[in-house]
Image: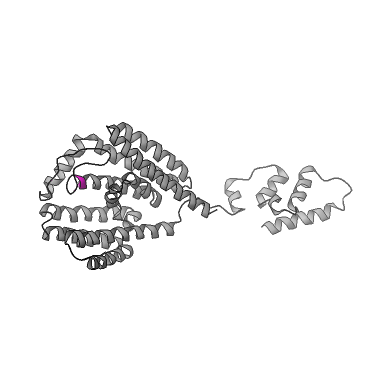
Amino acid sequence: ALTDIYAVGATARTLLAHQPYEPPPRLKEFVDRATSPNPAHRPQSAWAALKMLTGRKAPIEAASTGRKKRAPASLSRGLSDTLLRLLNGAVAGWLGYTLVFEVLGRGGAEAAGIAAGFGVLGYLLPRVAALGVIVALAVILLQSGTAGLGVATLLPVVGGLWVGGAGTASGDVARLPFGPLLAVPLSLVGLGAGLPFLMGALMRPLGATLSAAAGALALIFYEITLGDGVIPFVGGPFREMSVFAGPLELLEHAGRVLTVVPQTLSMVVLWTAMAAAVSVFEWTGRWFVGLALAAGGGALGYALFVSDSPQLLNEAMISLGLAAIMYGVLRYLASRARG
């Protein structure tokens, strides 16, 4: 197309050289620009050339056919799918290692082998691996005496509903069914507030919001059962629930925490909104807008609805700030790499 525009300009210049009068200003500008020695000064599309000649603006649909569209600064679908599978495999491997080394007390070599197998399976067959790890976790916890029948029953049921329900509704969840469990290790290193950024960057809005909400619920449930009862950014300690309680009793206790302590439910809603903001603008190529909304709205949400003490708010702001900075730097570098 650019060669043709130059050819039209050169042909027009040759024809006009035999005319006794000066060409119209628009025509003269077109000829000069189309044959400019600097390619950057020439019209970059047929519609740009026509606009120069006639002064009319081209329709958006037609203009897009006359020039190469620039891809939005978002991750390609193939790359995001690969990253989701890699992350799922990493979490599966971490769970496998934790089960064998910490729960069963086996040697490091055996734990590493199991972790590698879980990791490969988590990458190749995410949903199958998720169901397998969940069942294995329940059986191992039950046999080792670490947990009772309640947890052993609840884990496969809730996990199966998540993998089968949310995984069917969203392809992103199907590729990263272990996503909500990331809230636990991220919180242990002070980056729990970064889960909405991670989900929003890699997933489309439906999968991101589902995973962020499930991640907040998973973190709350972990802290009131296997943890110390102190929910990050919310506080505590809440009355811990015995892992040997029945499944209905466990669910009732978790429900009471969400109802009696509204900050916990507010955190679930806040994480969902942050992930949605990041995801929507990520996939429209305006990630910086999503970053600003998620970081600003997240800070306001923690201050007003989640953290009711200066210490908790300070922890929330540090975690949120670190997560936002990491996401912003990585996206900026990715945008620069894509030109």
Q: Residue placed farthest to the right in the image?
A: 20
User: Residue at position x 22%, y 68% from top?
Assistant: 110
Nearest the eye: 288 or 312: 312
User: Most prominent secondary structure in the magenta stretch?
Assistant: loop
Could you say which quadrant of the image residue 153 lies in?
A: bottom left
Q: Please provide percent x and percent y for residue 24.
A: 80, 43
One can see residue 306 in this view: no
Q: Position of residue 263 (x, y in %)?
A: 25, 35
Classify residue 191 as left or right of residue 143. right
Whether residue 140 is visible to the viewer of this picture, yes or no, is: yes
Observer-nearest residue: 227 or 171? 227
Check the image and tell me how it is coloured: one colour
> Relative to 173, is 37 on the left or the right?
right
Q: Which quadrant, please, contains the N terminus?
A: bottom right
Q: Residue 88: x, y in percent? A: 32, 58
75 left or right, relative to 178 = right
Question: In percent of the image, x 15 and y 61: which residue is there?
Answer: 140
Q: Is residue 233 magenta?
A: yes
Provide the residue span drawn in magenta. 221-245
- Give the quadrant of residue 316: top left
User: Is 248 contained in the magenta span?
Assistant: no
